[in-house]
Image (cartoon, rainbow, N blue to C red):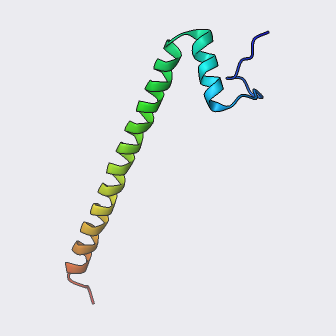
Amino acid sequence: MPTQPWKIGATMSGGESVFSLVAEHGPWVVLVFFLLWRDIQKEQATRAVLDKNAIVLTEIATVIRERMPRAH
């Protein structure tokens, strides 16, 4: 029975499991890993932009609040 590194309990190092998957299932496995990696990169870039926008909006709200006349 061939080893299936994608199953829970498999004991292969990271490099061996990737090579094993490619050897057993062909180059589409590399494509899947590449697409997942690109998806993670896009998600991280989106998160960075959203974090920056949140900081800018907080600063704008603070400036507006500071300049509003205070009710006594």
Which residue is drawn at the image coordinates 36% and 50% (left, top)?
A: 48
Residue 34 percent location from the top left of the image: 45, 25
Quarter of the image for the C terminus: give it: bottom left
The answer to which image quadrant residue 24 occupies is: top right
Q: Residue 32, position in %: x, y? A: 49, 20
Q: Is residue 54 left or right of residue 4?
A: left
The quadrant in which residue 46 appears is top left
Q: Residue at x 36, y 55 (%)?
A: 51
- Say if 58 sits above or below 31 in the image: below
Judged from this view, the residue extending furthest toward the bottom is: 72
Q: In this orientation, which residue lies closer to the viewer: 48 or 34?
A: 34
Q: Tell me which residue sits at (61%, 17%) in the image.
A: 21
Report how many numbered discs are placed on residues in the image. 0
Q: Is residue 28 above or below residue 50?
A: above
Left or right of 69 on screen, residue 26: right
* Place of residue 13 in the rendered image (x, y in percent of width and height, measured from the top left): 68, 31
Quarter of the N terminus within the rendering: top right
Q: Is residue 21 left or right of residue 11?
A: left
Instruction: Say above or below: 26 vs 18.
Output: above
Is residue 62 left or right of 28 when viewed as pictured?
A: left
- Residue at image coords 29%, 55%: 53
